[in-house]
Image (cartoon, grey):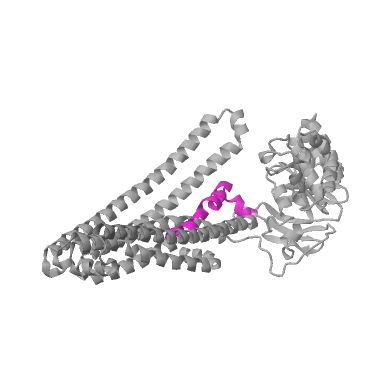
Amino acid sequence: MNIYARTIRYFRPFLWATAGGVALTLASIGFNLLKPWPFKFIVDGVLDKTAGTADTRELLQKWFGETETATMILWLCVAMVLISLLGGLINLVSNYLFVHVGLQALLKLRTDLYSALQALPLKFHDSRRSADSSFRVAYDSQSIQTIYNKGFATVLSSIVMLAATFVVMVRMNWPLTLASLAILPPVVWAIRFYAVKVRRQSTDIHERESDLLTIAQEGLSQIRMVHAFGRESFEVDQFRRRASKSLEANMRLNMTSVASALVVGTLMAAGTALMYYIGSLQVMNPAANFTLGDLLVFSAYLLMLYQPLEQLTYTAWALEGAAAGAQRCFEVLDSQDDVPEARDAEDFGPAKGRIEFRGVAFGYSDERRVLEDINFTIEPGQTVAFVGGTGTGKSTLLSLVPRFYDPGVGVVSLDGRDLRRLKKKSLRSQIGMVLQDTLLFSTTIRENIAYGKPGATEAEIVEAARKAQALDFISKMPQGFDSPVGERGGHLSVGQRQRIGIARAFLKNAPILLLDEPTSALDPSTESAIMGTIFELMRGRTTLIVTHRLTTVHGLGRIVVLKDGRIAEDGTGPELVAKNGVYAALYRDAMAHAG
């Protein structure tokens, strides 16, 4: 579907406001058409005493009677002001309606975009930069307002003004009107020629600005690392290079705009000059019955004719620029969910916690498989640790349980039911997670703990913090549970952030627990304290834990060893050491490093 047609769909809920704006625009145009006439009456009815203006003098005498000339001029000047004021007030209300509709449509598009980004699977986000997605929501989305306010509203008023002015000018002097429109074909050519360049260059600017935002966001979000490695100059140079590319793209677009304005302005100046030449000859020719006042009114109407024509020219280029942004928005909205929810998906819960992988294979791309022929069963309440070298697919395997991804081959089931037959929200409500780097929002400690259970009571939040052994440090903070954690939890230590994540999992109280390297970022003493809390969290829950810390899980129970995306070994820690295979080598290496 055409970009503009898709955009129009966002304005359907606001048809009445749009209709009101259209009606007021038409009224405003009517007042604009009246603007030149008071001055014509002053010129032809008062200032010019030639025979050709007798009709105008008679009309004024009929209106004003024997009123003094100065008073008559004063009233005509007052009429100019009143016509301009009334037209301006009507135009003000019309613009308010159009701007209101445009902003409402912008709100809807932004909400749809953000909703789509939230719903799209992790594979989509893995392949894109978060700053680019943010740019589309914050900036590209504004194109819909441009298309409406500078497109629909401007095009409508310009076309009506053109038509009305054309009719009036033809009735006044049709040969002069046709001469004035001689520039129309080259203007149309210029519009089409420059529109193609504007869209291409606008798309380039959007891409460059998105790159610039990415660099700025990454550099500022990793400011500690930048300072730690003394890379400030490098980051500034990177930013300058991207900013220079953005500058070049903007310069190209601005020069195109300047060149196009020069072409169109010159064409319109030529049309105006031609009108003045022919019109002046007609004024000097008594047989033409064309007065100086007529020429002044006609020149005012010519301005009214060229002004909307010029507006349409610039509107066409503005729309092409906006279309580039709209296209980037619709790319997101058109993105396919490769973890779709089945139409007959069912609600699920409470789960017992039996998880089964049958012949599962998965790859982030068709060329490279991360997991191959994965088969195992985890009974309710059982704890299973997944270990192996870097890149063996441990975290990927964990991501299949909450359906962050779907397997390319095989089935993952919960309590005997294929995960693809369950509603994602219902499935994920049965799963708690603690990750290597606890993700915190820039709000309070209370809101971060309660994130997994909206509507949790104060008592539940405090109890979850107590179980996570976080209550002690929270109570020492100036605002307690209302203390802000800072961006990404920057006001807290790594251990404190991890305890907040554990408290969140305690509060959710889900029957299935996924732990992805929950202690790898901690020092040994903090790890020991945190693991005690995690063991408490694991009690009574089906738990899948991924870790490189083999000493942590060696005596925990069942261990599954992955190698090259396949299950190499499966058993308890002592059993696997006795086999003297892959796990035994990993365990000896871990013990050597621990020693």
Range of residues picked out in magenta: 122-151
Picture quadrant of residue 318: bottom left
- Closest to the observer, 3 or 402: 3
Q: Is residue 102 left or right of residue 169?
A: right
Picture quadrant of residue 42: bottom left
Q: Is residue 125 magenta?
A: yes
- Closest to the observer, 498 or 21: 21
Q: Main secondary structure of the magenta part?
A: helix
Residue 355 shows in this picture? yes
Residue 126: image location, x then y, percent:
61, 50
- Closest to the observer, 436 or 314: 314
Residue 26: image location, x then y, percent:
40, 67
Q: Most extreme residue toward the right, as rendered?
A: 540
Q: Most extreme residue toward the front, as rendered?
A: 66
Residue 196: image location, x then y, percent:
37, 57
Residue 576: image location, x then y, percent:
83, 44
Q: Is residue 446 magenta?
A: no
Residue at 75% of width from left, 67% of height from top?
A: 346
Residue 572 shows in this picture? no
- Closest to the observer, 398 or 431: 431
Q: Is residue 190 left or right of residue 179?
A: right
In the picture, the quarter occupied by the C terminus is top right
Residue at 79% of width from left, 48% of height from top?
A: 505
Residue at 52% of width from left, 55% of height from top?
A: 141
Q: Is residue 78 left or right of residue 96?
A: left
